[in-house]
Structures are given as C-alpha cells and as structure tokens.
Image: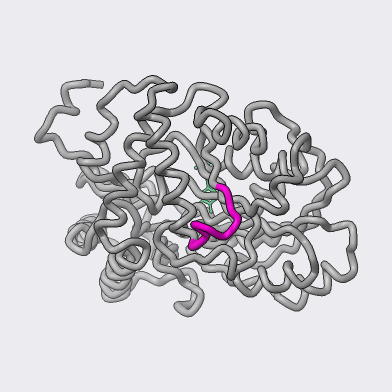
Amino acid sequence: MNPLKAMPGWKDKILFTPGPLTTSRTVKQALLRDLGSRDTEFIETVRFIRRRLLELGHVGDAGYEAVLMQGSGTFGIEAVVSSTIPPDGKLLVIINGAYGHRIAKITSILKIGVVKLEYPEDSCPDLEQIEETLKHDPAITHVAVVHCETTTGIMNPVGEIGGIVHRAGRVYFVDAMSSFGAVPMDLARCHIDYLVSSANKCIEGVPGFSFILARKEPFLKTEGYARSLSLDLFGQWKGLESNGQFRFTPPTHAILAFQQALLELEAEGGVEGRAARYQKNYQTLTAGMSGMGFQEYLPRDRQGYIITSYLYPEHPKFSFEEFYRRLNQRDQVIYPGKVSNANCFRIGNIGRIFEADIRTLLAAIREVIDEMGVVL
Ligand SMILES: *Cc1c(COP(=O)(O)O)cnc(C)c1O
C-alpha cells in the first residue's frame, strides 16, 4: 500500500457495484476536515441532513422523523428490527432475494417471532397471499420487504404492499437501501412506517452510517423495546432531539461528505434528475450487453435501473474469476452474483458514473471476452 497513490492526478477504479460506490471528488474533499462531535457546525450539519432526508421521502412536514445510525446499512435494519418490535411482536418478512433473507435472519437471531413468505428471486411477491397471511395470523404485528432487491435488481411493489399492510392495521418496514435517492418515493402514500437506507448508495456519500425515516405515531410508542444499547433507535433519536448529538462517536467525516452529496443530488435535479442519469446508464448498459449477446437474469418488466444481473455465458472458455480479473486490470470493477439458482454476475448503474463510463466498461468487456476466446 502506497498512501501517495491518493495524491491528485491518481484515478481510482470505477465501481459498478452495489456499494460502496464511486463518489465525486468534491464529496471526498468535503471530508478533509476534523470537526468535534459537539461543534455547532457539526450539529447544524446533522440537522440539515435529517431535514433534507425527510424532504427526499416527501414527508418533510408529515409526521416523520429522520434518525442517523452509525454503521453500514445492515446496522440500520438491525436497529429497526431490534428496537421497534414489541416483546410479543412478530414480523412477516416478504422475501425474494438475499437481503430479504438477511432481515429474517436478523429477526431470528434476536429471538423475535418471524414468518417468511418466500418467492423465487425472479418473481414479485404474491399480493393476495400477503393479504391472506395477515388475515389468518393475527399475531403478526409488523411486515418487512426490500424495495430494490439488490440480489437481482428486481423492484418490489412497495406501494401496493403498503396498502395491504395499512388496511390490515400492521406496521410496515421497507429496506430501501439501494433505491432511496434515485427512485421517487413518497413514504406517506406508500404507508411506510420505517424506511432504511444508507450513506453510500444512491445519495453517493461515503460509507459510515445508515439512516432511518420513521413515522412518529408508531415510533414514539417504541421506547423501551430496544434489545441492544448501541442500536436503540428511540434512544438515538432522543439523543439527536435533545442536544443534536449522537450518543456515541459519530462518523463526522462521513457526515460531512454526505452533506456535500445531498447538495450535489439537489444540483442534479433531485431524485428525478438522479433517476434520469441512472436510467440512461441502465439503457446504455442493456443495449451494449444485449448487443454482445449477454443475457439478463430477470425479465425486463421486473428489472429496475439500479443494478442488473447477467447470466454467465454458456461457453467453455468463460470463467467469472478470469473475466473479473481482466476487467479489474482495466480499472473496471464489476460484482459477483448472489442469485441462488443461477450463475450470474452483476453490474451496477449507481454511484458517480455516467453514460461515458458505461461505454468504457462495455468496450473493456468486449476486449476481455475476445481475449478469453469466449464466443457469445
Ligand atoms: C446494500 C444493501 C443493504 C445493506 O448492506 P450493508 O453492506 O450493510 O451496507 C441492505 N439491503 C439492501 C437491499 C442493499 O442493497
């Protein structure tokens, strides 16, 4: 490791991954400061971020609270599961990918009652079955689903599921980790009580914390439910509300970078502007990959524009490790697959990447498959 590599003029590899992502130079520059956790400038920054996150979810003045939580996205999910479900509560998890399974695993590790509705990774959940399950199991108090299942890139119908959960009088939790900030989202209209996302996904900040948007009405009743001190969501919120401070060391640098990332999101035209760039990335990628003969795992009508899973080419000379290594040598970082019943790799469209970057990636893929002698 040569720290001098970080000097100006040196360019990092481009990350076509589900996070951490490529960030702008100005986002990285914003964190080159040391602020104390009690510094008024830092407290103001946290306040600005919390307000702006609510606005991004269209609930700036609709009875919601924004809470920042140290750690990666999973810590935010664990904070919601561990501290908003009452002692006798039970969570229904709707699963069509690895991140849905992760929510169920967190719940069972916490020894909280859990029911799973599992669907194939290329299919959307069965809405009628969700409705029936809620009708026949009155013990279920909460329902959780992933918005964009990053395993495949499938988009789940969080609004329709929200309607069902709301009519059934249950609390609704959405993991919008890989979509928030790039897919328009109105929490109140989707009846979402808790939404989790993190700093280093579509808002294009650096890793270090997750954030939770919580509807006040159920949230304010959760005091004392926490099964963990550090992940106590109510406790964290109380700390932020009382003196604007975190209970434990905040990721000050990541928060400074995030403030800059939010300003850059706004400059790009907000969520709609960012969505347009990612959609363009997605269309360029899809056209180029199909043109070369690569096959997508998902049918197009279920495929979101966040990340795409591609089936391994059925050619004896294809090896993912070799493909990955040769792309990496060309500064192009793709991602392994996570689908359980098919061999896939993934290419993300998110982060500070543009159509020109996608074209560079496509050209590198063309070169690499030719070099490997893979015929598509
Ligand atoms: C990235 C991601 C997470 C959280 O992952 P971390 O590695 O903990 O940041 C959770 N759910 C989904 C859908 C994700 O894409």
In this rendered view, identify the residue nearer to me: 12 or 323: 12
Q: Which residues are magenta?
A: 58-65
Q: Going by the image, does 287 lie left or right of 19?
A: left
In this rendered view, identify the residue nearer to me: 61 or 97: 61
Residue at x 53% of width, y 56% of height: 176
Task: Look at the image and tell me whether residue 375 can be seen.
Answer: no
Residue at x 26% of width, y 40% of height: 27
Residue 298 in the image: above or below residue 212 = below
Q: Going by the image, does 243 lie left or right of 77?
A: left
Residue 96 in the image: above or below residue 51 = below
Quarter holding residue 294: bottom left
In this rendered view, identify the residue nearer to me: 131 or 188: 188
The N terminus - image quarter = top left
The C terminus - image quarter = bottom left
The way the protein has been coloured in the rendering is: one colour
Quarter holding residue 112: top right
The location of residue 194, given as percent across then percent down, is 63, 53
Quarter holding residue 123: bottom right
Give the residue at the far left of this rendering: 9
Residue 63 in the image: above or below residue 45 = below
Task: Look at the image and tell me whether residue 245 can be seen.
Answer: yes
Numbered disc total: 0
Residue 59 magenta-highlighted: yes
The location of residue 19, given as percent across then percent down, is 41, 46
Residue at x 60% of width, y 71% of height: 159
Q: Going by the image, does 23 lie left or right of 225?
A: left
Q: Determine the main secondary structure of the stretch shown in magenta.
A: loop
Residue 156 magenta-highlighted: no
